[in-house]
Image: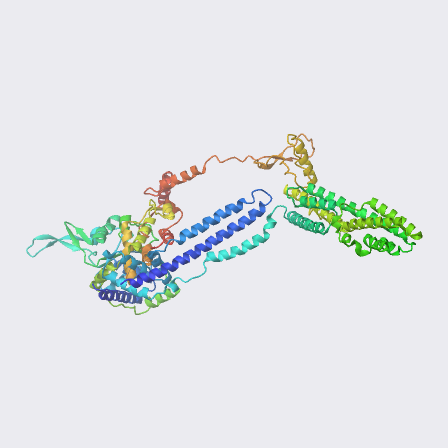
Amino acid sequence: MSVANVERSIEQFRNNIRLVREEVGRVIVGNDEVVDGVMTCLLARGHVLLEGIPGVGKTKLVQTLADVLHLKFSRIQFTPDLMPGDIIGTSIVREDDTGRKFFEFQPGPIFANMVLADEINRATPKTQSALLEAMQENSVSAGNATRPLEQPFFVLATMNPLEMEGTYPLPEAQLDRFFFKLKMGFPGIDQLHQVLDRTTQASAPAVERTLAAGDILAMRETAREVPIAHPVQDYAIRLTLATHPESEQAHEMARQYVRFGASPRGTQALILGAKVHALIHGRLHVASEDIRAVAISALRHRLLLNFEAEADRVDTDAILTRILADVAPAT
Amino acid sequence: MTDSLLQTLDAVASRLRWRRITALGGVVASSILVVVAVVIVLGAILAPTGVARWPLYAGGVAILFFLGYLVADARHAVSREEAAVAADRAAGLQDELSSALWFTRHPDERSAFVDAHLRKAETTAAGMDARALVPWRMPASGWSAVALLGVVAVVAMLAPRFTPHFGEHDFAQAAVDAAKRGAAVAPDSLAEDLSQGSDAATKDRLARTLAALDDPKKSLEERRKALEAARELVAQRALEAAAARERMKAIAESLADRAGYEEVAQALKEGDARQAADALRKQLGTGADGSGSERKETPADAEAGVDQAKVDEMADALQAAAQNGSSERGAEAQRNLARAVQNLDEIARSVEATEGAGHTARRLDAMTTELKREANLRAARFGQRNGAGQATPGPETGESNMKGGSMFRLGAVAQERRNPGKDSNRAGDASGNAQGDPVVGDEVRRIRAKFKRETVKDRDSGSESGEDSGKFAASRAAESKVAYRDVDSRYRRVGEEALSAERIALRHRAQVKGFFTDNGESAQ
């Protein structure tokens, strides 16, 4: 690829992002950071976990994004009685014209480009685990066969932080497979006005499909090409190590409140997310600022806090904010 | 391809280096000024002791250390990586230059993206001005140094106030200095008198006095004695001259009615022996010029003061000549006149030699006064140095506080008497040469007991009111029985227990389980 092609592909990348933002912005009010985060996950080949109180537009965001991206979309409403087969599919007995019976695999809703796992923590761990292979390997094993998933494959899970009764907290292994954990906050007065204007009138805003699967795959390739200098990469590593209480580089707060730090997968998420962030902001290289911008979203669900943190009501966001403030960027 | 980038980074590195040196220079200057201020204050506080120079030496060493550190730091150059980071931050480039520099040094990482990035960084660097990126400005440490300079100036002005017994010290020292200056002027005037002329004995005495005053090894007492001897001799000479003049006046009265001796009588009345001798020479016929060689004699030729025997002899000869002259002018009269002239010449020389004696005596008196004053001031200063006002109060000594001064001095004398092993008299030398008073008493010890008021039934007093009397007793405070580290580890253990899967401390699990079980049952 020549330098001119690079500049052209970056321009195309930014243009596509701008189109998606505009289209999503017609339906979703505010939450620009969440939209960027979801797009970052999609372009970095990751999956996103959306957390927010009921009614702030988590599901609406995913539905809108699916409409804009012109991808095969499926929604799974997670319930306690949901079974793994309900997600990945099952083999059913079929009979051909000769009367001979055979098993035929009926793909589940996971065979889509964009899967919305709504209220994922309401399903049992057994069902939740059905997503593990799909999220990590981009394939599904059912019966004796392993079936690849169509690319791009993107899981968006939503979670309600308030209702804990009858829910099953996601295990660490599953949490670690989510590229970002994004929190949707409550909108402000102006944003609420806009939400009401758009949703309480006769005509609902419509969006146009702007990106196809091919565009997204090309953007993913472009994002991977963004170079990162080792001093900046070193910054990401130091941030990760700062979350490990047993590490020499551990931050004081991590030593006090963290039981287990972020995994290497978390560092990968930092770098890949930073690359997409750099492209979104028109940079040809990854800067420390890109690392900082994605750090909390990439690491907040990968820290396992100890008893002391719960007793002191310290959450991972507070710890990461302190770490970002104290760990010096690339020098 | 990366020339502009490297050139810009080199320029930025150079400016960063100078900025660092400037900032460190400000820190070093501030540190040195702090050291100077401390040295001034400590020097003022320790001035009366023998260790007043130690802060100066320590301060000198500290200043040398700071300067050495500055020189060592100034030799270190700023790397291009540091310059790139600084330029990125100054221009808000988000690691553009530092990343580009890293890629230029790692060609194996080259790709189309890297080339595009390098090209962009090159363009950016070419448009950058190192002076705008790293402008020269006064570092904060420089302002600190300027502020500290003012502080040092104030400290230098106020330093004498930090000296113990500041008020007495200054005035007393100033008085001593003034007395020394006065004493230094007096010998000069004495030397002037010596050169103008006196008799040989007086000259010899003045010369010895001057030698004693100039000798730094001579004590105040020795100088005082030399001055006293000179003063007595000069006073003696002045007295003799006065007596000779009185006698000449009496002779003049007896010659007043003798014809031909009017001029002589008038000269003697005025006390002018030289003029009287010249008048007699005219009568003898030799003329005033006849004794020109004698008249040119200087008073310095006189061996001693006015000899009263010569005055008597001159009076007898003159009376005899006057009586003879009234009847006839015989050879006897000529001899008497010649003898009188000779005596008058000698008297004239002696009187002229003692003419300056009064002036010299006054100067010697003044010098003696100055010497006494210096002795008093030294004694006062000695008292101040030993921690108490011990000098006699008065404007001359600069001592106005009488609090226990004399008593402390008496105590020091008494202490000395208890140690008869030493010969020297350590106290009581009014000239100020006494040694320091010995330290009396043990060092102060802080009482560790903490007292609190306790109420005790006062049965012995037999008071009917039954009032309790307050007593003070040592507090019963004791050290903690449980060390802090034990408490801390216990707390840690609870935390570690809670790190199990349930995140509930082992000791609390039963209660927690019971709580939820009971709640569930009650809810149902």
- Of residue A18 and residue A282, the one placed in the foreground of this image is A282
The residue lying furthest to the left in this view is A98
Tally of numbered tags: 0
Q: Residue B433: percent from the left, percent from the top? A: 65, 40
Query: Relative to residue B353, is residue B174 drawn left or right?
Result: left
Q: Is residue B401 visible?
A: no
- Of residue A251 and residue B73, the one placed in the foreground of this image is B73
Query: Relative to residue B512, is residue A269 drawn left or right?
Result: left
Query: Does residue B298 lie above or below B15 as drawn?
Result: above
Query: Relative to residue B109, is residue B450 drawn left or right?
Result: right
Q: Residue B370: percent from the left, percent from the top? A: 71, 47
- Of residue B3 and residue A233, the one placed in the foreground of this image is B3
Query: Does residue A64 lie above or below B331 as drawn?
Result: below
Locate the C terminus of chain A by quadrant. Answer: bottom left
The residue lying furthest to the bottom in this view is A203
Q: Residue A57: percent from the left, percent from the top? A: 32, 61
The residue lying furthest to the front in this view is B331
Query: Relative to residue B44, is residue B406 drawn left or right?
Result: right
Locate the N terminus of chain A by quadrant. Answer: bottom left
Q: Residue A313: percent from the left, percent from the top? A: 39, 49
Query: Which residue is located at x 46 percent, y 35 percent?
Result: B482
Q: Is residue B115 visible?
A: yes
